[in-house]
């Protein structure tokens, strides 16, 4: 008797359906968490009287415009990464979104570490 007879008839499709639901949820959660952490650390930097550190081009100009400009620019980078990946390698779109979210999360942790070192 082979393994395909030991599983339920719809088990493989149920797992695929669950994976197709969980993967976008995790990627979106990483993006939201990363943007939240990097925004909180940028707000902490502004509260401490420091300029928020950003990877974006024109970061000081964006920081001068305020936190909403930083959040918009950071969200735009995630959208740009998602759009480019969807165009060039559609299979890896969720990977790119999750990587962008993880990148912003790590950037926020790094900025918090720098702020902690300044105190």
Image: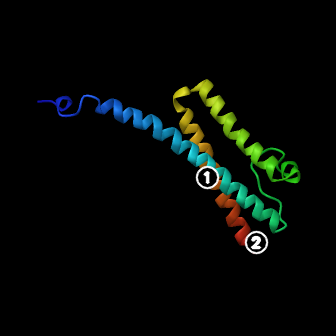
Q: Quadrant of the C terminus?
A: bottom right
- Tag 1's secondary structure? helix
Residue 39 spot, x, y in % from top left = 72, 55
Q: Which residue is mark 1?
A: 33
- Residue density around tag 1, few if under 14, some if 14–19, many if 20 or more, within 10 Å: some
Left or right: 108 in relation to 70: left
Q: What is the CA distance from the residue labelled 1 to the residue labelled 2? A: 24 Å
Residue at 46% over, 41% down: 22
Residue at 52% over, 42% down: 25
Left or right: 84 in relation to 1: right
Q: Which mark is residue 118?
A: 2
Q: Quadrant of the N terminus?
A: top left
Residue 2 spot, x, y in % from top left = 15, 30
Residue at 72% over, 61% down: 41
**In this rendering, is residue 83 above or below 75?**
above
Residue 114 spot, x, y in % from top left = 71, 65
| Residue at far top of view | 87
Residue 83 spot, x, y in % from top left = 65, 30
Mark 1 or mark 2: whose residue is earlier in sequence = 1
- Residue density around tag 2, few if under 14, some if 14–19, many if 20 or more, within 10 Å: few
Colour approach in the figure: rainbow
**In this rendering, is residue 94 above or below 56?**
above
Residue 90 versus residue 8: which sits nearer the camera? Answer: 8
**In this rendering, is residue 10 above or below 62?**
above
Left or right: 1 in relation to 73: left
Question: Within the image, what quadrant is residue 99 found in?
Answer: top right
């Amino acid at each position: 008797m082979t393994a395909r007879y030991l599983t339920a008839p719809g088990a493989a499709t149920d797992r695929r359906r669950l994976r197709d639901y969980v993967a976008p949820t995790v990627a979106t959660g990483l993006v939201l968490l990363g943007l939240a952490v990097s925004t909180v650390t940028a707000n902490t930097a502004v509260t401490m009287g420091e300029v928020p550190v950003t990877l974006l081009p024109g970061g000081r100009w964006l920081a001068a415009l305020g936190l909403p400009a930083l959040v918009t620019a950071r969200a735009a980078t995630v959208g740009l990464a998602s759009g480019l990946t969807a165009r060039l390698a559609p299979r890896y779109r969720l990977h790119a979104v999750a990587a962008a979210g993880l990148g912003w999360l790590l950037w926020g942790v790094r900025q918090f570490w720098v702020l902690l070192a300044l105190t």
